[in-house]
Image: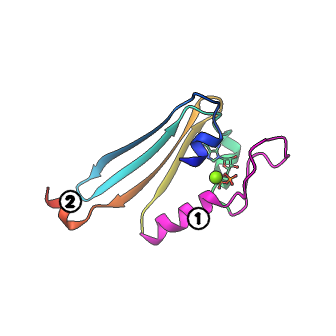
């Protein structure tokens, strides 16, 4: 969510949705209409310290660790994280989570 705000122009939007995926899983999606990411950079986004724009021309600083940490946490739960992005249009990061036994019952 922080990335979706950081890499978007002012007054663009971030949407968070939570949906049933299969019986015992949900998918959480964070969607923005920000700057998007060129296809060639997408495979490296989850690497430690990787940032698309390292030139320093970007006013927003960062360590490039955020997505690497997120991926570790998701994978520690044996879940999946996905990214889809269109340069100049926006990005969607999503991840799955297992429902608790209680919420599966409902
Ligand atoms: N929602 C997004 N829109 C555009 N680019 C993004 C988005 N999220 C991540 N990125 C790109 O992926 C890189 C890595 O993100 P992250 O691991 O969170 O590190 P940081 O935000 O510290 O640079 C960012 O530097 C940015 O180039
Ligand atoms: Mg970040």
Mark 1 and ligand 1: say if the CB distance to the nearest ligand atom is below 8 Å: yes
Determine the residue located farthest toward the bottom in the rendered image: 76
Position of residue 33 measured from the top left corner of the image (x, y, whole percent): 56, 31
> Quick check: 16 above or below 81?
above
- Residue at image position (54%, 67%) is 72
Q: Secondary structure at mark 1?
A: helix
Residues at marks 1 and 2, CA–CA distance in whole angstroms:
27 Å
Foreground of the two, 44 or 103: 103
Which contiguous range is marked in magenta?
48-77
Which label belongs to residue 103?
A: 2
- Whether residue 35 sits left or right of residue 16 in the image: it is right
Q: Examine the structure image and report whether residue 96 is included in the region drawn in magenta.
A: no
- Residue at image position (60%, 46%) is 3
Asked if the residue at tag 2 contacts the one at tag 1, i.e. Cβ–Cβ closer than 8 Å, the answer is: no
Position of residue 14 measured from the top left corner of the image (x, y, whole percent): 50, 37
Position of residue 103 measured from the top left corner of the image (x, y, whole percent): 20, 59
Q: Quadrant of residue 36?
A: top right
């Amino acid at each position: 969510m922080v990335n979706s705000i950081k890499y978007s122009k002012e007054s663009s939007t971030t949407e968070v949705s939570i949906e049933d995926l299969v019986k015992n899983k949900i998918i959480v999606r964070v969607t923005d209409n920000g700057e998007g990411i060129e296809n060639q950079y997408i495979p490296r986004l989850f690497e430690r310290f990787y940032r698309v724009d390292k030139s320093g021309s970007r006013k927003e600083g960062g360590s490039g660790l955020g997505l690497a940490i997120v991926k570790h946490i998701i994978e520690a739960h044996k879940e999946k994280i996905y990214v889809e992005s269109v340069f100049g249009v926006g990005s969607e990061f999503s991840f799955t989570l297992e429902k608790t036994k209680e919420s599966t019952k409902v």
